[in-house]
Image (cartoon, rainbow, N blue to C red):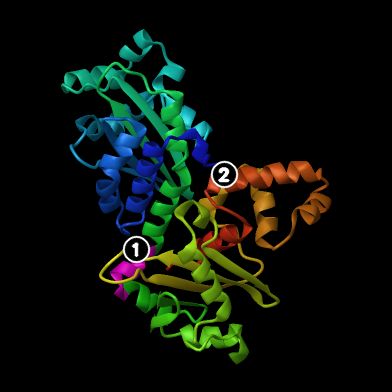
Amino acid sequence: MFNPTAFNTQELVLRDSVISGLNSALSIPKVLETTRASLLEFVQADAMALCLMHTAPFDFQWLVPGFPIRLLDDYAVLAEHDFLREPILARPNVPVRDTQLLTRSEYERTLIFQRSRELDLTLEHIMAVLLPIGPGLVGALAFYRNKRRPFSSENTAAVASLNEHLMNMVRNCNDAQGLMAGAHLLEELHRRPDSAYLVVEPPSRVEFRSEHANALLARWFTGADLHSSGLPLVFKERLDALVRMDADARLGKTLWVFNHPEGNRTCRFIEMPAADGPRRWALRLNEIPHSIPLPWEMERQLTPRQATIARHLLCNRNNEQIAVELGRKLLTVKTHVRNIFDKLGVDSRADLLYQAARLNKPV
């Protein structure tokens, strides 16, 4: 959790600059380039790289803002010799430094260090953190120093204070990719009466509605529930609140869920990149049945016991009901639920439902 008292005024200004950059576009390479200078200054590093890894099927892509790091071109060969890989996989969201794992002589004997010297690179120190983005997708963010000055606990605290913002950036870029592409998303939404989206200019001007938006909103709300603009009052209130919030307060509050007898109704609020004039928001609407299958992309990341509990969560059962049905202690179930969220990179039960529905019926 972000603790502002852990940073001085200059560091807080730098952090705000990083967060502003993370919300500046819906293209990950553009965001990394925009934030590179302020992020490196905040973390006190000389270079950085983000590795996006899909688990089903497995593949990875390194995104390197600024000057290329040629060592990463050989990562397919070096991956099994990456001494940071297992530690960050074991502890998501916890930054790990080379000096926490190896002595200097051990580090200099690693294949990564030796290969960097062959390429005339000076990767004297490395720090990395694993970011669970969503089911089947994780990000590994690495920072490098080219001088013999180890990363400190203050540097890891700086990275940790940005974890949720970094994860949110990647999620928003992925979620909005179809919106930015346009045609593919519209075609899919036109064939699916259970999904729609609105584009809204705050406070309440609806600039665009996809084909099924009116019918979906008519099922969800009565005329008394609507603002004079036609936007549901509950959406306007949520959007007004999000616009007033700073970036830290906004985290975890961009998904609205209503538990209806016919199924969960969700609205994802996505802030669009800045252009001329005020920022616009995309409101992604979905109807999700109470009981939906556990997608394979999720199941393969969980233990058998966690998968069983995840299926109960997708049937809209609470922790107490799951504990009784499985004959487990309530605390045990709560621990499993927390670990499921961590492994899948979801924020809450609502987000689990949302992500599972998206994987079962992707757009």
Q: What element carries label 1?
A: helix
* Residue 44 at least partly seen: yes
Q: Which of 86 and 28 is in front in this view?
A: 28
Measured Cα–Cα span from mark 1 to mark 2: 24 Å
Chief SS of the magenta region: helix
Q: Relative to 150, is 331 above or below?
A: below
Range covered by the magenta-colored residues:
176-183
State which quarter of the image contains the C terminus.
bottom left
- Upstream in sequence: badge 1 or badge 2: 1
Q: Mark 1 points at which residue?
A: 177
Please, what is the three-letter code of the amino acid marked with disc 2? Asp
Q: Relative to 130, is 18 above or below?
A: below
How many marks the image carries: the answer is 2
Residue shown at 72% from the left, 45% from the top? 334
Q: Does the magenta stretch include residue 179?
A: yes
Q: Where is residue 279 in the image (x, y as percent from the top left)?
A: 35, 68
Q: Mark 2 points at which residue?
A: 342
Q: Position of residue 173 (x, y in %)?
A: 36, 58
Q: What element carries label 2?
A: helix
Residue 158 is left or right of residue 223, and the answer is: left
Please, what is the three-letter code of the amino acid marked with disc 1? Gln
